[in-house]
Each structure stands twice: as C-alpha cells, then as structure tokens.
Amino acid sequence: MSKDMENSSRGGKLGQMRWMFNRIAPSYDFLNHLFTLNIDQLWRRRLARMVAQERPKQVLDLATGTADLAIALARKLPEAEILGLDISTEMMAVGEKKICKAGLEQRITLDEGNAEALTQGDESFDAVTVGFGVRNFDHLAQCFAEMHRVVRKGGRVAILELSTPRNRFVRAFYNGYAHRFMPWLGGLISHDKAAYRYLPASISAFHRPERVVEMLTEAGFKQVEAHKHLFGIAYIYLAVK
C-alpha cells in the first residue's frame, strides 16, 4: 500500500475507496472496458432491461461512478428520473461529461452520497441499482438495510457484481488474468498498481452468491434471485421489497 493510501486509510475503508477511485478516475472507463472486452457494458444493459420491466419512474443508482449504469437505465426508461450517488467526486466528474454528451442531463442527477447512510427519505424510489459497487461497501448489511428503506413497497433492487467462478479450469485462467495481467497493465496505464491489485483482490474476498442472496433476504427483501453470467464471473441479483 502506498504512503498516500495508508494516510487515507485513517478514515477507514470509505476513505480508502474515495482516495483510490478519485485517483484512477481518468483511466477507469478505458481500463474497465478493455479488461472485460466491453462485456461489462452488455451486463449493464441486461440489468437495465430487467429493471425496465417494472417501468420505475424514480431510480436510485448507488456507487454510480462514471454513470455508465445510470445512462443505460435512462436509455431504457425514457420517462424515469435517475439519481446517481457516489463517494468519488472525480469519478462523477467523468460521468457528468458523459451524461451531457448523451443529452441526458435533464433526467440524470449525480451527487455525493454514502450508501451506508442515505439522506433520502423512506420509500423515495421505485427501484435501486448498484453496478460493480457492493463489494466495495464496508458494511454491506447496513447498505442493504438502507436500500430496503428507501425503495417503495413492491419496488425492485437490482445489483450487478463480479464473482470468482467455481469451475476450476475457468477459475485458473481467471485468477491468472485478474491477479497478474490486470495489475501489470492497470498499473502501467493508470500509474496506480495498488488500485489494480485491490480491485481483483476485492472480488476474491467478496461473498459467494448464496451469501449475497441470504443477506438481501435478511434485509427484508423477497423474491431474491441470483442470475449467473459468463461462467459465474458476474451475477445480477434481483430482489423485491
């Protein structure tokens, strides 16, 4: 861990995540799409289609980052208003430019916010989404409780997150790619090798899909489902309040 990241850690994991994502924001989109061969965008569009089935009018996108998921949702939901929250102002600054370029600034609003302590009122949203963010949350059960609080009764929560594949052959290739190639190339381009060591390590350390389903159920959600994609490299979790 670098000296700067050590200093940021005094604020706990939240401070670490804010510092890291602010630092890698300029190269984040390029590397994200490069490492996944743009499949990450396909997964976001799939999640957006799932959410769009219920035609929500008010959507909260947590850990919105550079707003890729918020934009995908806006395109599938032409009548919806979307609020994207994130702790990284630099990531959102990149997202604001993309939103303006897409002509969606009237329907997507980005703001700083912590998923563990949302300031929005009870049952304020028809749907809550998270794209590649829950594994970075320090207190996941608290975040799920907050998501349950702010979504209306009958509203849907949709989460897209990476996972470690269980097939041993797929896992062997995936681990070599994620833990060796990604830190090398990510560090070369972003000048922050520590960040691109953390990101794959956070996937390995994250809960198994069964546990995520359990935690959503424990938070009060019903009809909780886990949809596997690409041999279990990613999952889309759906739940209803």
Image (tube, rainbow, N blue to C red):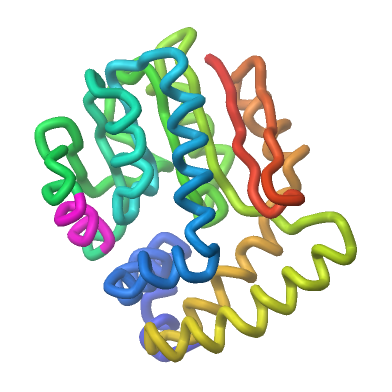
Instruction: Identify the residue at image location x=48%, y=81%.
Output: 186
Q: Residue furthest top?
A: 154
Question: Is any part of residue 114 visible from this angle?
Answer: yes
Instruction: Give the magenta range.
Output: 91-98
Instruction: Give the number of callouts.
Output: 0
Asked whether, in this view, residue 215 is left or right of residue 238, the answer is: right
On screen, residue 211 versus residue 203, left or right, reads right
Q: x, y (%) of residue 131?
A: 46, 45
- In front here: 176 or 124? 176
In the image, residue 148 sits, relative to residue 160, either above or below, namely: above
Give the residue at the far right of this rendering.
168
Residue 95 colored magenta? yes
What residue appears at the point 37 percent right and 43 percent down from the top-left corner?
Answer: 69
Whole-percent x and y of residue 53?
A: 46, 16
| Residue 10 in view | no
Expressed as whole percent of the image width and height from the top left, the position of residue 179 reads 66, 78
Magenta span has 9? no
In the image, residue 221 sits, relative to residue 94, either above or below, namely above
At x 45%, y 39%, the residue is 45
Can you say whether 162 is above or below 78 in the image? Answer: below
Position of residue 2 relative to residue 214, above or below, is below
- Where's residue 148, x and y in %? 48, 23
Horizontal relation, residue 180 to residue 80: left or right: right
Pick the residue in front: 51 or 121.
Answer: 51
Q: Residue at x 68, y 34 (%)?
A: 227
- Image quarter for residue 146? top left
Q: Main secondary structure of the magenta part?
A: helix
